Image (cartoon, coloured by chain):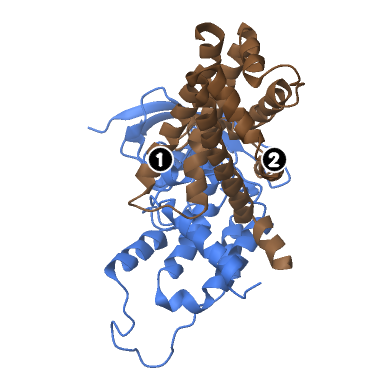
Chain colours: A brown, B blue
Protein backbone atom coordinates (compact mmCIF):
# COMPACT_ATOMS: atom_id res chain seq x y z
CA UNK A 1 0.00 0.00 0.00
CA UNK A 2 3.07 2.19 0.11
CA UNK A 3 2.60 2.98 -3.59
CA UNK A 4 -0.88 4.30 -2.91
CA UNK A 5 0.36 6.65 -0.19
CA UNK A 6 3.19 7.79 -2.47
CA UNK A 7 0.84 8.40 -5.40
CA UNK A 8 -1.89 10.19 -3.46
CA UNK A 9 0.59 12.04 -1.24
CA UNK A 10 2.39 13.63 -4.22
CA UNK A 11 1.46 17.11 -5.41
CA UNK A 12 -0.61 15.65 -8.26
CA UNK A 13 -2.15 13.05 -5.93
CA UNK A 14 -3.33 15.76 -3.54
CA UNK A 15 -4.89 17.60 -6.46
CA UNK A 16 -6.63 14.38 -7.47
CA UNK A 17 -8.08 14.04 -3.96
CA UNK A 18 -9.36 17.64 -4.16
CA UNK A 19 -10.84 17.02 -7.61
CA UNK A 20 -12.65 13.78 -6.79
CA UNK A 21 -14.09 15.01 -3.49
CA UNK A 22 -14.95 18.36 -5.12
CA UNK A 23 -16.81 16.65 -7.96
CA UNK A 24 -18.58 14.57 -5.29
CA UNK A 25 -19.77 17.77 -3.60
CA UNK A 26 -20.94 19.18 -6.94
CA UNK A 27 -23.10 16.10 -7.52
CA UNK A 28 -24.37 16.36 -3.96
CA UNK A 29 -25.29 20.02 -4.54
CA UNK A 30 -27.23 19.07 -7.67
CA UNK A 31 -29.20 16.43 -5.73
CA UNK A 32 -29.71 18.72 -2.75
CA UNK A 33 -31.04 21.47 -5.01
CA UNK A 34 -33.40 19.13 -6.87
CA UNK A 35 -34.87 18.07 -3.51
CA UNK A 36 -35.15 21.62 -2.21
CA UNK A 37 -37.05 22.76 -5.29
CA UNK A 38 -40.05 20.75 -4.01
CA UNK A 39 -40.60 23.78 -1.74
CA UNK A 40 -42.20 25.53 -4.75
CA UNK A 41 -44.87 22.80 -4.81
CA UNK A 42 -45.84 23.81 -1.28
CA UNK A 43 -45.53 22.69 2.31
CA UNK A 44 -46.83 19.15 1.78
CA UNK A 45 -44.59 18.38 -1.17
CA UNK A 46 -41.50 19.50 0.76
CA UNK A 47 -42.45 17.60 3.93
CA UNK A 48 -43.21 14.50 1.91
CA UNK A 49 -39.85 14.78 0.10
CA UNK A 50 -38.13 14.99 3.50
CA UNK A 51 -40.14 12.01 4.79
CA UNK A 52 -39.29 9.92 1.73
CA UNK A 53 -35.63 10.81 2.06
CA UNK A 54 -35.54 9.83 5.75
CA UNK A 55 -37.43 6.60 5.06
CA UNK A 56 -34.32 5.41 3.20
CA UNK A 57 -32.84 4.85 6.68
CA UNK A 58 -29.40 3.21 6.59
CA UNK A 59 -28.78 4.35 2.98
CA UNK A 60 -29.04 7.96 4.16
CA UNK A 61 -26.70 7.29 7.09
CA UNK A 62 -24.19 5.72 4.70
CA UNK A 63 -24.45 8.72 2.36
CA UNK A 64 -23.96 11.09 5.29
CA UNK A 65 -20.88 9.22 6.44
CA UNK A 66 -19.59 9.27 2.87
CA UNK A 67 -20.06 13.03 2.66
CA UNK A 68 -18.37 13.47 6.02
CA UNK A 69 -15.40 11.40 4.80
CA UNK A 70 -15.22 13.44 1.57
CA UNK A 71 -15.40 16.65 3.61
CA UNK A 72 -12.53 15.55 5.86
CA UNK A 73 -10.37 14.62 2.85
CA UNK A 74 -11.22 17.88 1.06
CA UNK A 75 -10.55 20.06 4.12
CA UNK A 76 -7.34 18.33 5.25
CA UNK A 77 -5.86 18.15 1.73
CA UNK A 78 -6.92 21.72 0.98
CA UNK A 79 -5.33 23.00 4.18
CA UNK A 80 -2.11 21.10 3.41
CA UNK A 81 -1.99 22.56 -0.11
CA UNK A 82 -2.65 26.07 1.21
CA UNK A 83 0.15 25.77 3.77
CA UNK A 84 2.65 24.22 1.31
CA UNK A 85 1.85 26.77 -1.40
CA UNK A 86 2.27 29.63 1.05
CA UNK A 87 5.67 28.26 2.10
CA UNK A 88 6.82 27.78 -1.51
CA UNK A 89 7.41 31.54 -1.84
CA UNK A 90 9.15 32.72 1.35
CA UNK A 91 9.97 36.19 -0.08
CA UNK A 92 6.90 37.75 -1.69
CA UNK A 93 6.88 40.10 -4.66
CA UNK A 94 6.61 43.79 -3.80
CA UNK A 95 4.48 44.20 -6.91
CA UNK A 96 1.94 41.61 -8.03
CA UNK A 97 0.11 41.71 -11.30
CA UNK A 98 -1.99 39.07 -13.01
CA UNK A 99 -1.48 38.22 -16.66
CA UNK A 100 -5.18 37.43 -16.85
CA UNK A 101 -5.02 33.75 -15.90
CA UNK A 102 -6.48 34.05 -12.42
CA UNK A 103 -10.17 34.49 -11.76
CA UNK A 104 -12.01 35.64 -8.65
CA UNK A 105 -12.71 31.97 -8.03
CA UNK A 106 -9.13 30.69 -8.37
CA UNK A 107 -7.74 33.61 -6.38
CA UNK A 108 -10.01 33.02 -3.38
CA UNK A 109 -10.29 29.19 -3.26
CA UNK A 110 -8.83 28.68 0.26
CA UNK A 111 -10.78 31.60 1.73
CA UNK A 112 -14.14 30.79 0.13
CA UNK A 113 -13.54 27.18 1.14
CA UNK A 114 -12.92 28.13 4.76
CA UNK A 115 -16.04 30.31 4.78
CA UNK A 116 -18.10 27.45 3.34
CA UNK A 117 -16.88 25.13 6.11
CA UNK A 118 -18.14 27.56 8.73
CA UNK A 119 -21.38 28.01 6.79
CA UNK A 120 -21.96 24.24 6.55
CA UNK A 121 -21.56 23.86 10.32
CA UNK A 122 -24.01 26.75 10.81
CA UNK A 123 -26.41 25.22 8.26
CA UNK A 124 -26.33 21.78 9.89
CA UNK A 125 -26.98 23.29 13.33
CA UNK A 126 -29.94 25.22 11.89
CA UNK A 127 -31.74 22.47 10.01
CA UNK A 128 -30.12 19.09 10.71
CA UNK A 129 -29.16 18.86 14.39
CA UNK A 130 -32.40 20.41 15.55
CA UNK A 131 -35.22 18.96 17.62
CA UNK A 132 -37.89 18.04 15.06
CA UNK A 133 -40.51 16.67 17.50
CA UNK A 134 -43.93 18.27 17.13
CA UNK A 135 -42.97 20.25 14.07
CA UNK A 136 -42.18 19.72 10.38
CA UNK A 137 -39.07 20.56 8.43
CA UNK A 138 -41.10 23.06 6.41
CA UNK A 139 -42.05 24.95 9.58
CA UNK A 140 -38.45 25.00 10.80
CA UNK A 141 -37.16 26.33 7.49
CA UNK A 142 -40.04 28.78 7.07
CA UNK A 143 -39.69 30.32 10.50
CA UNK A 144 -35.90 30.57 10.14
CA UNK A 145 -36.17 32.60 6.95
CA UNK A 146 -38.68 35.02 8.45
CA UNK A 147 -35.56 36.39 10.08
CA UNK A 148 -33.89 38.75 7.60
CA UNK A 149 -30.47 37.95 9.11
CA UNK A 150 -30.77 34.30 8.03
CA UNK A 151 -31.85 35.29 4.54
CA UNK A 152 -28.81 37.59 4.16
CA UNK A 153 -26.37 34.96 5.50
CA UNK A 154 -27.75 32.24 3.22
CA UNK A 155 -27.75 34.41 0.09
CA UNK A 156 -24.16 35.55 0.75
CA UNK A 157 -23.11 31.94 1.42
CA UNK A 158 -24.57 30.84 -1.90
CA UNK A 159 -22.72 33.60 -3.76
CA UNK A 160 -19.50 32.42 -2.10
CA UNK A 161 -20.30 28.78 -2.92
CA UNK A 162 -20.80 29.76 -6.56
CA UNK A 163 -17.45 31.59 -6.66
CA UNK A 164 -15.78 28.47 -5.20
CA UNK A 165 -17.48 26.16 -7.71
CA UNK A 166 -16.80 28.45 -10.71
CA UNK A 167 -13.10 27.57 -10.38
CA UNK A 168 -13.48 24.20 -8.71
CA UNK A 169 -15.58 22.47 -11.33
CA UNK A 170 -13.47 23.05 -14.48
CA UNK A 171 -10.32 22.78 -12.38
CA UNK A 172 -11.34 19.29 -11.25
CA UNK A 173 -11.63 18.18 -14.88
CA UNK A 174 -8.20 19.66 -15.68
CA UNK A 175 -6.76 17.84 -12.66
CA UNK A 176 -8.15 14.42 -13.56
CA UNK A 177 -6.52 14.98 -16.95
CA UNK A 178 -9.72 15.69 -18.90
CA UNK A 179 -8.51 18.74 -20.78
CA UNK A 180 -9.49 18.13 -24.36
CA UNK A 181 -9.68 20.60 -27.25
CA UNK A 182 -13.23 19.53 -28.02
CA UNK A 183 -14.63 19.49 -24.49
CA UNK A 184 -12.70 22.05 -22.39
CA UNK A 185 -14.58 25.15 -23.67
CA UNK A 186 -17.86 23.33 -22.89
CA UNK A 187 -16.65 22.30 -19.41
CA UNK A 188 -15.72 25.92 -18.62
CA UNK A 189 -19.16 27.13 -19.68
CA UNK A 190 -20.79 24.37 -17.60
CA UNK A 191 -18.76 25.53 -14.55
CA UNK A 192 -20.14 29.05 -14.82
CA UNK A 193 -23.68 27.87 -15.59
CA UNK A 194 -23.60 25.46 -12.64
CA UNK A 195 -22.38 28.30 -10.37
CA UNK A 196 -25.27 30.48 -11.55
CA UNK A 197 -27.71 27.62 -10.92
CA UNK A 198 -26.38 27.39 -7.35
CA UNK A 199 -26.79 31.12 -6.69
CA UNK A 200 -30.25 31.36 -8.23
CA UNK A 201 -31.49 27.89 -7.27
CA UNK A 202 -30.41 27.87 -3.62
CA UNK A 203 -30.17 31.64 -3.13
CA UNK A 204 -33.76 32.40 -4.09
CA UNK A 205 -35.23 29.78 -1.71
CA UNK A 206 -34.70 31.82 1.52
CA UNK A 207 -36.13 34.91 -0.19
CA UNK A 208 -39.14 32.93 -1.40
CA UNK A 209 -39.76 31.33 2.01
CA UNK A 210 -39.26 34.56 3.94
CA UNK A 211 -41.22 36.96 1.78
CA UNK A 212 -43.38 35.19 -0.79
CA UNK A 213 -44.61 31.84 0.57
CA UNK B 1 15.33 60.09 -35.06
CA UNK B 2 15.53 57.83 -32.06
CA UNK B 3 12.99 58.55 -29.40
CA UNK B 4 14.33 58.57 -25.84
CA UNK B 5 12.55 58.24 -22.51
CA UNK B 6 13.43 58.81 -18.86
CA UNK B 7 12.53 56.18 -16.28
CA UNK B 8 12.69 55.56 -12.57
CA UNK B 9 13.85 52.01 -11.79
CA UNK B 10 13.31 50.21 -8.52
CA UNK B 11 15.67 47.25 -8.65
CA UNK B 12 16.05 44.40 -6.17
CA UNK B 13 19.63 44.50 -4.84
CA UNK B 14 20.89 41.59 -2.77
CA UNK B 15 24.60 40.91 -2.17
CA UNK B 16 24.29 37.15 -1.75
CA UNK B 17 22.00 34.23 -0.97
CA UNK B 18 22.12 34.68 2.79
CA UNK B 19 22.16 38.50 2.67
CA UNK B 20 19.10 40.66 3.10
CA UNK B 21 17.99 42.43 -0.07
CA UNK B 22 16.01 45.57 -0.77
CA UNK B 23 14.65 47.65 -3.65
CA UNK B 24 16.92 50.52 -4.67
CA UNK B 25 15.93 53.42 -6.88
CA UNK B 26 17.88 54.45 -9.99
CA UNK B 27 17.24 57.09 -12.63
CA UNK B 28 17.48 55.89 -16.24
CA UNK B 29 17.95 58.96 -18.41
CA UNK B 30 17.79 59.21 -22.23
CA UNK B 31 16.93 55.56 -22.82
CA UNK B 32 16.42 54.83 -26.52
CA UNK B 33 13.05 53.15 -27.15
CA UNK B 34 14.85 50.85 -29.62
CA UNK B 35 16.82 49.27 -26.77
CA UNK B 36 15.88 45.93 -25.30
CA UNK B 37 15.18 45.77 -21.58
CA UNK B 38 18.55 44.12 -20.95
CA UNK B 39 20.36 46.81 -22.96
CA UNK B 40 18.67 49.38 -20.76
CA UNK B 41 20.10 47.60 -17.68
CA UNK B 42 23.52 47.52 -19.46
CA UNK B 43 23.35 51.32 -19.70
CA UNK B 44 22.50 51.62 -16.00
CA UNK B 45 25.35 49.23 -15.16
CA UNK B 46 27.88 51.31 -17.13
CA UNK B 47 26.70 54.35 -15.24
CA UNK B 48 26.96 52.50 -11.89
CA UNK B 49 30.46 51.25 -12.77
CA UNK B 50 31.62 54.78 -13.63
CA UNK B 51 30.27 55.94 -10.27
CA UNK B 52 32.32 53.19 -8.61
CA UNK B 53 29.22 51.28 -7.54
CA UNK B 54 28.42 47.58 -7.92
CA UNK B 55 26.56 46.89 -11.22
CA UNK B 56 23.24 45.03 -11.14
CA UNK B 57 23.78 41.28 -11.55
CA UNK B 58 21.36 39.60 -13.97
CA UNK B 59 21.37 36.41 -16.05
CA UNK B 60 21.45 36.61 -19.84
CA UNK B 61 23.06 34.82 -22.74
CA UNK B 62 21.73 34.70 -26.31
CA UNK B 63 19.54 37.82 -26.14
CA UNK B 64 17.51 36.29 -28.96
CA UNK B 65 14.75 34.83 -26.82
CA UNK B 66 15.80 31.20 -27.27
CA UNK B 67 18.24 30.26 -24.52
CA UNK B 68 16.15 30.71 -21.37
CA UNK B 69 18.83 32.42 -19.33
CA UNK B 70 17.30 35.87 -18.89
CA UNK B 71 14.25 36.83 -16.93
CA UNK B 72 13.12 39.13 -14.15
CA UNK B 73 9.75 40.17 -12.81
CA UNK B 74 8.95 43.58 -14.29
CA UNK B 75 6.12 45.45 -12.58
CA UNK B 76 4.77 42.15 -11.23
CA UNK B 77 4.95 40.33 -14.60
CA UNK B 78 7.68 37.73 -15.39
CA UNK B 79 9.51 38.84 -18.57
CA UNK B 80 7.48 42.07 -18.51
CA UNK B 81 4.09 43.00 -19.90
CA UNK B 82 4.36 41.68 -23.49
CA UNK B 83 2.81 38.30 -24.31
CA UNK B 84 5.08 35.48 -25.55
CA UNK B 85 8.25 37.52 -25.03
CA UNK B 86 11.44 36.95 -23.06
CA UNK B 87 12.97 39.87 -21.17
CA UNK B 88 15.74 40.27 -23.78
CA UNK B 89 13.14 40.62 -26.51
CA UNK B 90 11.10 43.17 -24.58
CA UNK B 91 11.78 46.59 -26.05
CA UNK B 92 11.70 49.91 -24.27
CA UNK B 93 9.12 51.23 -26.74
CA UNK B 94 6.54 49.41 -24.61
CA UNK B 95 7.22 51.88 -21.80
CA UNK B 96 6.30 55.56 -21.55
CA UNK B 97 8.33 58.57 -20.47
CA UNK B 98 8.56 58.97 -16.66
CA UNK B 99 7.34 55.42 -15.95
CA UNK B 100 8.42 53.77 -12.72
CA UNK B 101 9.54 50.18 -13.28
CA UNK B 102 9.89 47.67 -10.43
CA UNK B 103 12.38 44.89 -11.25
CA UNK B 104 12.52 41.82 -9.00
CA UNK B 105 14.08 38.35 -9.31
CA UNK B 106 12.03 35.12 -9.73
CA UNK B 107 10.59 34.38 -6.29
CA UNK B 108 10.43 30.75 -5.20
CA UNK B 109 11.83 28.71 -2.36
CA UNK B 110 13.34 26.43 -5.02
CA UNK B 111 15.09 29.39 -6.71
CA UNK B 112 17.35 31.04 -4.11
CA UNK B 113 18.74 34.44 -5.14
CA UNK B 114 22.45 34.25 -6.08
CA UNK B 115 22.83 38.00 -6.41
CA UNK B 116 20.44 40.85 -7.27
CA UNK B 117 18.28 39.52 -10.15
CA UNK B 118 20.20 36.28 -10.73
CA UNK B 119 18.60 33.18 -9.18
CA UNK B 120 19.76 29.57 -8.83
CA UNK B 121 17.62 27.51 -11.22
CA UNK B 122 19.42 24.16 -11.06
CA UNK B 123 16.24 22.76 -9.48
CA UNK B 124 14.87 22.63 -13.04
CA UNK B 125 17.91 20.63 -14.19
CA UNK B 126 17.51 18.24 -11.28
CA UNK B 127 13.94 17.46 -12.39
CA UNK B 128 15.19 16.65 -15.89
CA UNK B 129 17.96 14.46 -14.44
CA UNK B 130 15.37 12.61 -12.38
CA UNK B 131 13.60 11.78 -15.67
CA UNK B 132 16.51 9.54 -16.66
CA UNK B 133 17.05 8.23 -20.18
CA UNK B 134 14.98 7.07 -23.13
CA UNK B 135 15.80 3.96 -25.13
CA UNK B 136 16.87 4.59 -28.72
CA UNK B 137 18.74 2.27 -31.06
CA UNK B 138 22.34 3.17 -31.70
CA UNK B 139 24.37 2.23 -34.77
CA UNK B 140 23.54 3.15 -38.32
CA UNK B 141 20.73 5.63 -38.78
CA UNK B 142 17.49 3.78 -39.43
CA UNK B 143 15.15 4.64 -42.27
CA UNK B 144 13.19 7.84 -41.88
CA UNK B 145 9.62 7.10 -40.76
CA UNK B 146 10.54 3.54 -39.70
CA UNK B 147 8.67 4.38 -36.49
CA UNK B 148 5.43 6.11 -37.50
CA UNK B 149 4.65 9.36 -35.64
CA UNK B 150 1.58 11.34 -36.62
CA UNK B 151 2.04 14.91 -37.73
CA UNK B 152 -0.30 16.01 -34.92
CA UNK B 153 1.73 14.25 -32.20
CA UNK B 154 4.95 15.66 -33.65
CA UNK B 155 3.50 19.19 -33.55
CA UNK B 156 2.25 18.80 -29.97
CA UNK B 157 5.63 17.41 -28.88
CA UNK B 158 7.39 20.29 -30.61
CA UNK B 159 5.09 22.80 -28.85
CA UNK B 160 6.08 21.25 -25.52
CA UNK B 161 9.75 21.09 -26.52
CA UNK B 162 9.66 24.85 -27.16
CA UNK B 163 10.14 25.24 -23.37
CA UNK B 164 13.42 27.06 -22.81
CA UNK B 165 13.47 26.34 -19.07
CA UNK B 166 13.58 30.01 -18.06
CA UNK B 167 11.45 29.45 -14.94
CA UNK B 168 8.89 32.18 -15.69
CA UNK B 169 6.07 29.69 -15.02
CA UNK B 170 7.36 29.20 -11.48
CA UNK B 171 7.79 32.96 -11.05
CA UNK B 172 4.27 33.64 -12.36
CA UNK B 173 2.52 30.89 -10.39
CA UNK B 174 0.83 32.24 -7.24
CA UNK B 175 1.95 28.95 -5.63
CA UNK B 176 5.47 28.92 -7.14
CA UNK B 177 4.67 25.58 -8.76
CA UNK B 178 6.84 24.11 -11.53
CA UNK B 179 4.05 22.05 -13.10
CA UNK B 180 4.07 23.81 -16.49
CA UNK B 181 7.81 23.25 -16.85
CA UNK B 182 7.58 19.61 -15.77
CA UNK B 183 4.52 18.98 -17.94
CA UNK B 184 6.37 20.31 -21.01
CA UNK B 185 9.35 18.03 -20.29
CA UNK B 186 7.14 14.98 -19.73
CA UNK B 187 4.89 15.75 -22.71
CA UNK B 188 7.65 16.10 -25.28
CA UNK B 189 8.59 12.47 -24.59
CA UNK B 190 5.17 11.04 -23.76
CA UNK B 191 3.88 11.90 -27.23
CA UNK B 192 6.49 9.77 -28.99
CA UNK B 193 6.83 6.00 -29.29
CA UNK B 194 10.53 6.36 -28.43
CA UNK B 195 9.72 7.57 -24.92
CA UNK B 196 7.18 4.84 -24.11
CA UNK B 197 9.29 2.12 -22.41
CA UNK B 198 10.37 4.52 -19.63
CA UNK B 199 7.14 6.58 -19.46
CA UNK B 200 5.90 5.30 -16.09
CA UNK B 201 9.27 5.51 -14.35
CA UNK B 202 9.86 8.98 -15.78
CA UNK B 203 6.50 10.41 -14.65
CA UNK B 204 6.86 9.07 -11.11
CA UNK B 205 10.47 10.06 -10.51
CA UNK B 206 10.14 13.52 -12.05
CA UNK B 207 7.05 14.38 -9.99
CA UNK B 208 8.71 13.01 -6.86
CA UNK B 209 11.80 15.13 -7.52
CA UNK B 210 9.66 18.24 -8.09
CA UNK B 211 7.89 17.72 -4.76
CA UNK B 212 11.22 17.28 -2.97
CA UNK B 213 12.70 20.47 -4.39
CA UNK B 214 10.22 22.69 -2.56
CA UNK B 215 8.02 23.94 -5.40
CA UNK B 216 4.36 24.64 -4.61
CA UNK B 217 1.38 22.63 -5.83
CA UNK B 218 -0.54 23.51 -8.98
CA UNK B 219 -4.04 24.88 -8.35
CA UNK B 220 -4.90 25.62 -11.99
CA UNK B 221 -4.55 29.39 -11.67
CA UNK B 222 -3.31 29.34 -15.31
CA UNK B 223 -1.01 32.32 -14.77
CA UNK B 224 1.91 30.18 -16.06
CA UNK B 225 0.39 29.67 -19.49
CA UNK B 226 -0.38 33.40 -19.73
CA UNK B 227 3.22 34.38 -18.87
CA UNK B 228 5.20 31.64 -20.64
CA UNK B 229 7.41 33.30 -23.28
CA UNK B 230 6.95 30.19 -25.44
CA UNK B 231 3.18 30.13 -24.76
CA UNK B 232 3.17 26.54 -23.56
CA UNK B 233 -0.37 25.38 -22.86
CA UNK B 234 -1.76 23.92 -19.62
CA UNK B 235 -3.13 21.03 -21.70
CA UNK B 236 0.41 19.72 -21.09
CA UNK B 237 -0.34 19.76 -17.34
CA UNK B 238 -3.44 17.65 -17.95
CA UNK B 239 -1.24 15.25 -19.97
CA UNK B 240 1.31 15.11 -17.13
CA UNK B 241 -1.54 14.33 -14.72
CA UNK B 242 -2.71 11.48 -17.00
CA UNK B 243 0.85 10.15 -17.32
CA UNK B 244 1.24 10.28 -13.54
CA UNK B 245 -2.05 8.46 -12.86
CA UNK B 246 -1.24 5.81 -15.47
CA UNK B 247 2.14 5.29 -13.81
CA UNK B 248 0.89 5.51 -10.22
CA UNK B 249 -2.25 3.38 -10.50
CA UNK B 250 -1.79 1.09 -13.50
CA UNK B 251 1.93 0.39 -13.92
CA UNK B 252 4.07 -1.91 -11.77
CA UNK B 253 6.43 1.01 -11.17
CA UNK B 254 6.72 2.11 -7.55
Dot 1, how many residues are within 10 Å of its Cα: few (below 14), some (14-19), or many (20+)?
A: some
Instruction: Name the residue located 68 percent from the left edge and 58 percent from the top edge.
Output: B212
Choose between A104 and A44: the one closer to the eye. Answer: A44
Q: Is residue B211 above or below residue B139?
A: above
Tell me the element at label 2.
Answer: loop
Subunit under mark 2: A
Choose between B190 and A38: the one closer to the eye. Answer: A38
Instruction: Name the residue located 57 percent from the left edge and 74 percent from the top edge.
Output: B132
Instruction: Name the residue located 57 percent from the left edge and 29 percent from the top edge.
Output: A49
Tell me the element at label 1.
Answer: helix
Instruction: State the residue position of label 1.
Output: A188
Q: CA distance from mark 2 to mark 1?
A: 37 Å
> Which circle, 2 or 1, is nearer the viewer?
2
Q: Is residue A153 above or below residue B175?
A: above
Let me know if residue B182 appears in the view. yes
Instruction: State the residue position of label 2.
Output: A57
Amino acid sequence: MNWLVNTLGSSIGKKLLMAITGLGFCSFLAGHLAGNLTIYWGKDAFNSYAAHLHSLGPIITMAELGLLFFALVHILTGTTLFYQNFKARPVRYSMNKSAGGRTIGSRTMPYTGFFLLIFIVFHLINFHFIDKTGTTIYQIVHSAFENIGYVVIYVIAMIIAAIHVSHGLWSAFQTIGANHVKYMPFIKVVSYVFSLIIVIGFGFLPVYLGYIA
Amino acid sequence: MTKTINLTLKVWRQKGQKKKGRLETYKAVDISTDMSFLEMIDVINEQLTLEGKEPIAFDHDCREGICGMCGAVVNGRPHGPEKGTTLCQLHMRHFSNNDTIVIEPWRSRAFPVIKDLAVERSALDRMIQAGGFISVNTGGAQDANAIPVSQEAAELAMDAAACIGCGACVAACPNASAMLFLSAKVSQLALFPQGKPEAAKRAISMVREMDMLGFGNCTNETECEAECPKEISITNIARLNREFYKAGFFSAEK
